[in-house]
Image (cartoon, rainbow, N blue to C red):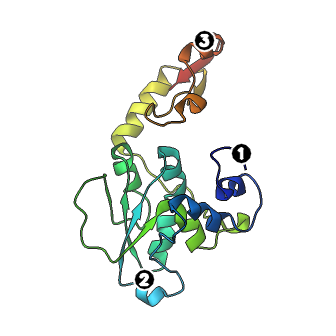
Amino acid sequence: LPNGFTPGMVWVASSGANGPESRDARLGGGNACTVSVASSSVIGAIRAVVVDEQGLGDALQFARYATLLAAQGARPLIQCPPPLRNLLATVPGVVAAYGPGESLPRYDAHVALLSLPRVFATQWDNVPATVPYLAASAERRAAVRASFARGAGMLNVGLAWAGNKANPNDRNRSMPLAALAPLLDIPGTSWHS
């Protein structure tokens, strides 16, 4: 396998059937999940803490699985990085979102967010695809509209060019803004970061 990749990561880019199980190898080989969808009568009585243990993008992408937990009768609580707390609290079925170190209410089970595809036996044909599953606040939407208004009549383009500087692999995930300078000169385009 490529350096730093688990079999589950490779599955994400391929069609292997054991990806979700292999992906849990990142947790030290144990089954980090104490939630089973096979027993919905038990799930209906529990509060499940869904813990985000990866990056912001993964949290945004996989938060949709909390809705599946709720559909089984669970009351999902998401523990996530502070910048995502308000946004992930809008996922349908999520009871509340908490930042790291915040006091959690009593809960009966926990699960790593990226273990949920395994819990729900996800394959390419059953990835949860109900959208939208996130909702920004009215204030945030107004701010974005105002930003886009400055580029009225232009092509509005969003750039994701820098990640978390604390990430050990940031040098492979980010680029200097100066590298994008030629793009910024394209006429008729309004850039947003």
Kindly identify which residue carries mark 3: 181
Say whether residue 46 is visible: yes
In the rendered image, residue 178, in percent from the top left (x then y), is placed at 56, 12
User: Which disc number belongs to residue 2?
Assistant: 1
Residue drawn where x is 55% and y is 58% of the image: 26
Mark 3 and mark 1: span between their CA atoms?
32 Å
Q: Please state which amino acid type lies under the numbered disc 3.
A: Ala
Comparing 185 with 169, the one in front is 169
Disc 3, disc 1: CB below 8 Å? no
Mark 1 and mark 2: span between their CA atoms?
38 Å
Above or below, comparing residue 188 to residue 20 in the picture: above
Q: Decide which of tag 2 and tag 3 comes sooner along the chain.
A: 2
Residue drawn where x is 55% and y is 21% of the image: 191
Residue found at the very far right of the displayed protein: 15
Instruction: Tell me: 49 left or right of 101.
Output: right
In the rendered image, residue 66, in percent from the top left (x then y), is placed at 47, 66
| Dot 2 crowding, Cα within 10 Å, few <14, some 14–19, many 20+ | many
Q: Please state which amino acid type lies under the numbered disc 1.
A: Pro
Residue drawn where x is 44% and y is 76% of the image: 34
SS at circle 3: helix
Mark 2 and mark 3: span between their CA atoms?
52 Å
The total of numbered circles placed on residues is 3
Say whether residue 64 is visible: no
Instruction: Tell me: 48 left or right of 20.
Output: left
| Dot 1 crowding, Cα within 10 Å, few <14, some 14–19, many 20+ | few
Q: Decide which of tag 3 and tag 1 comes sooner along the chain.
A: 1
| Dot 3 crowding, Cα within 10 Å, few <14, some 14–19, many 20+ | few
- Nearest to the eye among marks 3 and 1: give it: 1
Kindly identify which residue carries mark 2: 43
